[in-house]
Amino acid sequence: MQAHNLQIGYRKQQPVFGNISFAAGEGDMIALLGVNGIGKSTLLRTISGLQLPLSGEITIGQKNLTQTSAAERAALVSIVLTEKLAIDNITVRSLIALGRSPYTGWLGQLSKADEQLIGEIISLLKLENLQHKFFNQLSDGEKQKVLIARALCQQTPVIILDEPTAFLDFRNKRDILQTLRNVCDTLKKTVILSTHDIEAAVEHCNKCWIMTEQKTFEEITKTADFGKDVKSLLQLP
């Protein structure tokens, strides 16, 4: 995924943020950092295709995201939003299977290959013991893993998550971030997530995108001084 000179927001006269350029490659796990209200969620919604940029372009491979149909975007980008889902009467396996919707047509008929993929994803995320439970019976940490599994079943090269650890305790935060790190390493997905947990971002991610209060967009790749550089840009001690 690449972006060139993006300007994001809801009205051209009042952009939220501008001059955003970046490159994200296979296997990258990228933390998007910045203070509340600076535009992190707006950026994630824009690069996932949920809203159009005010200007600039976003490409995945050779495809311009702003010129693709909803069906084409569903095969390129999957997204896990921060809102808690109140879903009743659906099992974990059935919810994960919804990730195949872009490929099953309006009847939603799963093929043997679809069923095999769903089983592999459930195994990869160690959800075997939960697959026949109802989604609303799960803990917040378990629910987040299920939503990540659904995104993986969509088989997109890019997965975007808006604050995936926001409602989780310390142990579940580490578990989710390690799961995402494994997805990047084993499946070579590009994972982009927003977070306020700087220490966890530095530990698990190999890149950080920082939206500074000076309205500059900075991309930092992991080095020996990664954590120090990140904190410096965020003006933290």
Image (cartoon, rainbow, N blue to C red):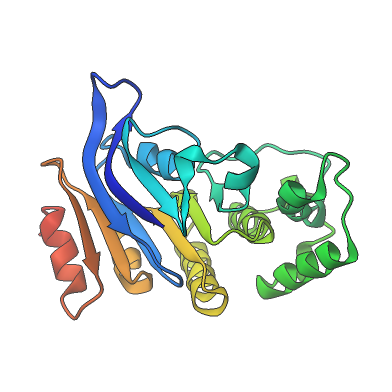
Q: What's the residue at 31%, 20% (across, down)?
A: 11
Q: Please give the name of the residue rendered at 42% of the width and 45% of the height, measured from the top-left corner.
A: 47
User: As drawn, is 211 to the left or to the right of 200?
Assistant: left
In the picture, the quarter occupied by the N terminus is: bottom left
User: Residue 221, located in which quarter of the rendered image?
Assistant: bottom left
Q: Residue 180, percent across and down?
A: 51, 67
Judging depth in this view, the residue of 211 and 197 nearest the camera is 211
Q: How many numbered circles are shown?
A: 0
Residue 218: image location, x then y, percent: 19, 55
Question: Measured along the vertical axis of the image, is residue 41 above or below residue 199?
Answer: above
Does residue 230 sit above or below 160 in this rendering?
A: below
Is residue 203 placed above or below 7 in the rendered structure? below
Quadrant containing the C terminus in the rendered view? bottom left
User: Is residue 98 shown to the viewer in this render?
Assistant: no
Q: Quadrant of residue 18?
A: top left
Where is residue 104 shown, x and y percent of the image?
81, 49
Q: Is residue 31 above or below residue 228?
A: above
| Residue at screen point 18% across, 81% down | 224
Nearer to us in this view, 173 or 95? 95
State left or right for residue 191 relative to residue 31. Answer: right
Say left or right for 96 vs 206. right
Kindly identify the residue that appears in the image at 18 percent across and 62 percent down. Answer: 230
Report the side of 221 relative to 80 (left or right). Answer: left
Tell me if residue 169 can be seen: yes
